[in-house]
Amino acid sequence: MLSFLPKPLVGIIAICLYTLNLSFWFTLLLLTALGKWLIPMAKWRRTWQHLLDKIPPAWVMGNNFIMWLTSRTRFEITGLENLDPNTWYLLLANHQAWSDILVLFRVFAKRVAPVRFFLKEELRWLPFVGQACWILDFPFMKRHSSKALARHPELRLQDIETTRKACAKFKDLPITLINFAEGTRFRSLKHQKQQSPYKHLLKPKAGGIAFTLAAMPEKLQQILDVTIVYAPHRANFWDFCCGKIEKVTLAIRVLPIPGSWRGDYVEDKVFRQAFQAQINQLWQEKDVEIDELLRN
């Protein structure tokens, strides 16, 4: 372990190692994808797809080794019981830093179906990461601002169609779809600008959740409600790489998706308001839970 080194040096080493790990597995991913697309034969493509599916877990193992090497961060996790790798889940989590992704992959690898998450369309062009996610069929979404939707309500229909097309790829393959409902990482300035009613969270965006549930009504039956807390303070990716985070706590709840969460989010105003109220209530519970975890 390298925790005896100065923290900034540890951070530089960690970022270099994460980049090398990503570059190595991305190269293999690209070569494997080219092999799959080379010959349009079903049996040939199934064989290469099997190889393709083995690469993300190997990348996660590399990341886990780097965490062990560069930090002494402890993981405290509750609620892992009864997770089923053959079940479709919608995972709702708060979002603080890029390290959330490393943490979620570490905790849920092999415990649930392959993890996918919605990405902003702009991230498609992010070197390595964007192309790797595109090869692995991660859904990319164009996000419209509230002002744009107010001026052009028809954009909501585009969002629904985009979500439906993205989810159609997963109707025969169990997956765990991650949705960071806040839409972006928590920052104090964003929190103040939003005038968020929550102490530790930004306002959740209910539309993306509703569209996903509407796109996969038969498959998505359970929610993984995940609360991520870093100690001793709010995390950023640099602090995580430097080994300044002493503990990461994950509180996990498996919740059935109630019937009241399914409806026409665009046309049915009553349903839309009721659904937003239920998501806000879930976020209020999460805010209280974060407060309790920080006190403990």
Image: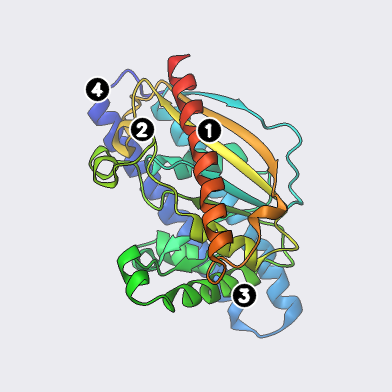
Label 4, on which residue?
6
Q: Residue 200 at what x, y percent from top left? A: 38, 33
Task: Determine if residue 165 is in view.
Answer: yes
Label 3 crowd (10 A; few <14 / some 14-19 / many >=20): many
Residue named by callout 2: 240
Looking at marks 3 and 2 on the same chain, the residue that comes earlier in the sequence is marked by 3
Q: What residue is disc 3 on?
A: 36
Residue drawn at x 32%, y 17% is 4
Q: Amino acid at mark 2?
A: Phe
Q: Amino acid at mark 1?
A: Glu
Q: Give the residue at mark 1.
A: 285
Which of the pair 227/176 is nearer the observer? Answer: 227
Image quadrant of residue 247? top left
Of mark 2 and mark 1, the one earlier in the sequence is 2
Work out whether mark 3 precedes mark 1 in sequence or the reverse, and give the earlier one.
3
Residue beneath the point at 41% across and 40% down: 99
Task: Provide the secondary structure element on which disc 3 rests.
Answer: helix
Image quarter of the N terminus: top left
Using the numbered discs, state the Cα–Cα distance from disc 2 to disc 1 in whole angstroms. Answer: 26 Å
Q: Amino acid at mark 3?
A: Lys
Of the two numbered discs 1 and 4 in the rendering, the one whose residue sits closer to the viewer: 1
Compared to residue 275, the image places residue 134 above or below, namely below
Q: Which amino acid type is marked by label 4?
A: Pro
